[in-house]
Image (cartoon, helix red, strand yellow):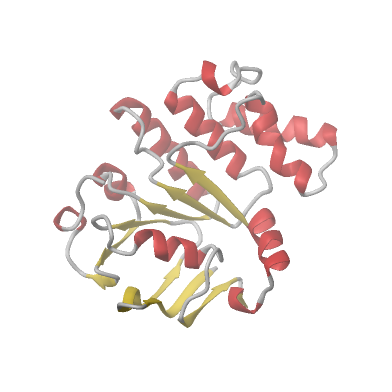
């Protein structure tokens, strides 16, 4: 599915070199939630950006379905992200002037899906996450938990193989956070690879696999030893 092989990221400036990520290797399995945890500055965001093809590793390789992302040009990477990768963000990143159904349908339009199919699929995804009565609500009329579930439905719009979630419960209360965790577990049960960057130890506990990062290195300590507030 998604595989990182000895990936490192080194930034160079006049003061010298800074290693943001060092020799990280891992195979991210389909049908599983993998949580990436660690303190601020540990390399979590760097790892996510490399796995998603937003940046290139200094050394090492990233493969999605045995295709090396580093060999793709920017257009090919954008196409890969559109069709094979979904994203969920802490701040939701919904389009404020579009209602819930239109937000979910938006990436389908970029992928060339017909208007009728976009509408049907968007409604089905929203109903799946308990938002059948919120189809025509603008984001500001939705609670934080509802907005995050809209964001998750949008991440599934083009039937991706991999879903990245960057601090998906960071802005939510405990009850809403549990709802989003259950939704992510449901997504993984589809056979998708779900990768979460989080400080939320409850979310990490719900994952099938937990990777700890500290100073750019994978560490073996349990997540409670390396987690903490953002």
Looking at the image, which residue sits at the far left? 225
**Up/down of 151 relative to 41, above or below:** above
Q: Nearer the viewer, residue 87 or 176?
A: 87
User: Residue 66: in sight, yes or no?
Assistant: no
Quick check: 9 left or right of 78? left
Quick check: 40 left or right of 113? left
**Up/down of 110 relative to 134, above or below:** below
Quick check: 117 left or right of 3? right
Q: Nearer the viewer, residue 208 or 230?
A: 230
User: Residue 47: in sight, yes or no?
Assistant: yes
**Up/down of 43 relative to 83, above or below:** below
The residue drawn where x is 49% and y is 48% is 189
Q: Quadrant of residue 213?
A: bottom left
Looking at the image, which residue sits at the far front? 14
The residue drawn where x is 47% and y is 65% is 29
**Up/down of 213 relative to 177, above or below:** below
The residue drawn where x is 35% and y is 78% is 14
Instruction: Give the x, y percent position of residue 118.
Output: 77, 36
Instruction: Give the x, y percent position of residue 156.
Output: 61, 44
Quick check: 24 left or right of 89? left
Instruction: Give the x, y percent position of residue 170.
Output: 34, 38
Q: Quadrant of the N terminus?
A: bottom right
Q: Nearer the viewer, residue 200 or 15?
A: 15
């Amino acid at each position: 599915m998604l595989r990182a092989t000895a990936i490192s990221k080194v930034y160079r400036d006049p003061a010298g070199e800074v290693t943001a990520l060092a020799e990280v290797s891992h195979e991210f399995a389909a049908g599983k939630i993998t949580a990436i945890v660690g303190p601020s500055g540990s390399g979590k965001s760097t790892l996510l950006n490399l796995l998603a093809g937003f940046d290139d590793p200094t050394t090492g390789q990233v493969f999605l379905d045995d295709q090396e992302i580093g060999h793709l040009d920017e257009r090919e990477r954008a196409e890969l992200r559109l069709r094979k990768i979904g994203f969920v963000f802490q701040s939701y990143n919904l389009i404020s002037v579009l209602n819930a159904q239109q937000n979910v349908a938006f990436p389908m339009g970029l992928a060339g899906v017909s208007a009728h199919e976009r509408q049907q699929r968007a409604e089905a995804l929203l109903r799946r996450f308990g938002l059948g009565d919120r189809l025509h609500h603008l984001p500001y009329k939705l609670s934080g938990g509802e907005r995050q579930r809209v964001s998750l439905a949008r991440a599934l719009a083009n039937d991706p193989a991999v879903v990245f979630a960057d601090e998906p419960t960071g802005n939510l209360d405990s009850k809403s956070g549990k709802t989003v965790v259950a939704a992510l577990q449901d997504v993984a049960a589809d056979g998708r690879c779900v990768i979460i960057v989080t400080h939320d130890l409850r979310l990490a506990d719900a994952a099938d696999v937990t990777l700890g990062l500290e100073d750019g290195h994978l560490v073996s300590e349990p997540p409670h030893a390396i987690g903490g507030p953002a």
